[in-house]
Amino acid sequence: MSNYFKQTKPFVVPTTDGKTIEEHFGLASTKQKNFSIAHMIAPANWSEPFQTPQFDEVTIMIKGKKLLEIDNEKVELSAGESILIKKGSRVRYSNPFEEDAEYWAVCMPAFSIDLVNRENE
């Protein structure tokens, strides 16, 4: 058994909104429970419903911009910036801009549909 695992085939999360999600480590890809990390591309004019996750989430922007609505405060995140959103915060992620938004997301514990608490739109 090796002391490392090189991810060469991340789990591609099926989506219906045009967003690309490739989970490198986490519940879906490696059964990792304490954290997950995913590479994402949110197309221009993309948005998702509000959620109140039961995990901390770090977003690291690579390209473009993203709009975050966190507990009624709007925060714009640009390439080269990062943010930590604490579990229990009500948050909505969107890309109302002209350019695709590319970023990495790290969730602790790992992202789970059972812990994200998405609201119906």
Image (cartoon, rainbow, N blue to C red):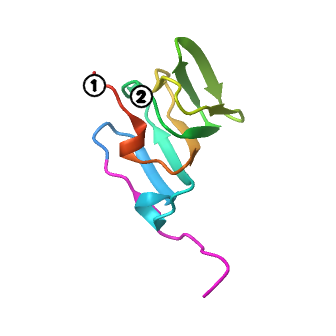
Quarter of the image that includes the N terminus: bottom right
Return the residue at label 1: 120
Residue 96: horizontal and vertical position, in percent?
Answer: 46, 20
Instruction: Bin the neighbour count of mark 2 within 10 Å (Cα to Cα): few under 14, some 14-19, many 20 and up.
Output: some
Highlighted magenta segment, given as a residue range? 1-14
Residue 45: horizontal and vertical position, in percent?
Answer: 41, 24
Main SS, magenta region, reads loop
Residue 46: horizontal and vertical position, in percent?
Answer: 40, 28
Quarter of the image that includes the C terminus: top left
Return the residue at label 2: 51
The reply, left or right, for residue 106 in relation to residue 94 is: right
Is 81 drawn above or below residue 21 in the view shown? above
Q: Per the image, is 52 magenta?
A: no
Instruction: Bin the neighbour count of mark 1 within 10 Å (Cα to Cα): few under 14, some 14-19, many 20 and up.
Output: few
Residue 77 vs residue 2, the one in the foreground: 2
Residue in view at x 55 percent, y 49 percent: 109
Residue in view at x 63 percent, y 26 percent: 77
Residue 68 vs residue 107, the one in the foreground: 107
Looking at the rendered structure, the secondary structure element under dot 2 is: loop
Residue 92 badge: none
Q: Are marks 2 and 1 in contact (CB under 8 Å)?
A: no
Residue in view at x 38 percent, y 33 percent: 117
Looking at the rendered structure, the secondary structure element under dot 1 is: loop
What is the residue that sits farthest to the right in this orientation? Answer: 80
Chain-order first, disc 2 or disc 1? 2
Residue 54 vs residue 64, the one in the foreground: 54
Residue 71: horizontal and vertical position, in percent?
Answer: 53, 16
Callout 1, which amino acid?
Asn
